[in-house]
Image (spheres, grey):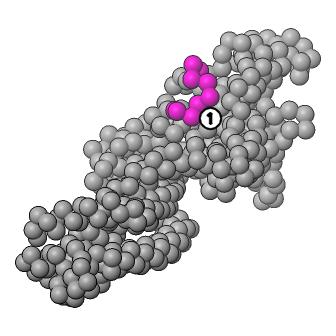
Amino acid sequence: MSMHTIYLALKYLTRRKIAFFAICSVGLCVALMIIITSLFNGFLDKFEEFWQYEYGQIMLISDNDVPDISAAADYLGEIPEVESTRINITSGGLLLLGRGNVKMAIVKGIDLERELRQEHFRDGLVIDESCTNEFELSDKQIDLSEKWLEKKLRREITDADRPVNVVPCIMSVGLLTEEDSQSDGYDYSNIKQKLTDWKSPATLFSGSIDRAEDGVTQVKRNQYYCWPINAVEVGSYQIDKNTLFLPYDYVIKNFNVLPQILITGKKGISEPELQEIVSNAWINYRQNVLKLPSRDIYRFRCVISTEDQWLQMFIGEIHKQLMIMKVILGFVCLVAGVLIFVILMMVVINKKRDIGIIRASGGSRSSVSGLFLNYGLSIGVCGTILGLIFGFIIVNKIEVLENCLSAILGYNIWSAKSYAFSKIPDQVHLQSLWWIILSGILTAGAGAVIPAYKASKIEPAESLRYE
């Protein structure tokens, strides 16, 4: 292409106001694609992230024949392919927090030292200064517990009554306060004040099956006392709503549930490979360390948590919705391509004189068509860059935008109760950028094909007849 045609392409792009609308249409399509793909994929990534946090990549469930579950977790954590191991025992009960304040609670037995290695748990603690590696009551809390026991027994307690049978616990923020209906968040200052002013243990009620010698089965009600030493918000609504974290050894001792070891592998290790490695290591541990009989060595389950049928069905449905949104965005891009086609056809009609000059001065048909193809591609490149800028800004500031829209409309657009997470995904899905950029440029290029062909068919004599 000659310098003259390049000059004309730049002149048309910079001095024709109508080109600005074409650039904006491409930019709008690109920005929409970035926002929608980032939100959908961010939601899926968050869901899988919290699923892995709650269940691990590999879930090892063994019988109650492991005397020291922490030592077993340490053994598995020494495997080169394993990134981390955690202990989890899950049960349930009713939690009495005060007169008339009863809530259903999910009881989770955890190893606090291991749990604090998890970013969600560590960063979600309300009171950072009480973040120790052990479940421990402060001197003030021990003193208040003893006064509570004296009041309950109606006598002074003796050394035989110590230590008071009150277990320290960490409560999810949803147990201590309700989320704000406007902001969908929790009042941390109120939670801190409640923890500071706590006067007596909370009561946890749970049921267990009691089998008598005559074979009669009865449900026995158990009653435990716990004192909150901290509160936590991990970011998952289901966990933050009503979870009570207790020491794992306390839950193993008092609740009739099987302990779980949650294993996360290092990057590059597939889940089936990790499952096989962990299974073989666990068999070796039961055989050589625990010295179990041959018939009991294989009495355990080692499952890949992400192969859960409900999870696969849920993720599949979200992917279907994302595909539908991509089809809709494809039609939006088609409209943008039609707009560029109309704009370039108007340019071709209005610039017949320039086309005739190019042809009369020796320009070929291909140079003329190249002029308008490059004009269309330039619109696509500029529009794509504009869309990338706005797309990145909107995704990264999506929380601010959601708060503003919620304030204007009077209701929450993003509800943790509905979407499972307290925070909107705000990271651009970089893996999708290549096809988004390609779509923006090709949309404009496709809209320029017919106008470029029409321009190349214009004869010099016809275009300059009346000049």
Residue 97's x, y, as percent?
Answer: 81, 34
Q: Is residue 157 magenta?
A: no
Q: Is residue 5 visible?
A: yes
- Please state which amino acid type lies under the numbered disc 1: Val
Q: Residue at x 26, y 61 (%)?
A: 11
**Magenta highlight range:** 122-130
**On the rendered image, what quadrant is the C terminus found in?**
bottom left
**On the rendered image, what quadrant is the N terminus found in?**
bottom left
**Magenta region, main secondary structure:** helix
Nearer-the-camera pick, 197 or 275: 197
Q: Is residue 448 left or right of residue 394?
A: left
Q: Residue at x 14, y 66 (%)?
A: 4
Q: Which residue is mark 1?
A: 232
The vertical placement of 241 against 165, above or below, is below
Nearer-the-camera pick, 247 or 49: 49
**Res. 202 image quadrant:** top right
Q: Residue at x 75, y 41 (%)?
A: 180
Q: Is residue 215 left or right of residue 263?
A: right
Classify 10 Å Cα crowding around label 1: few (below 14), some (14-19), many (20 and above). Answer: many
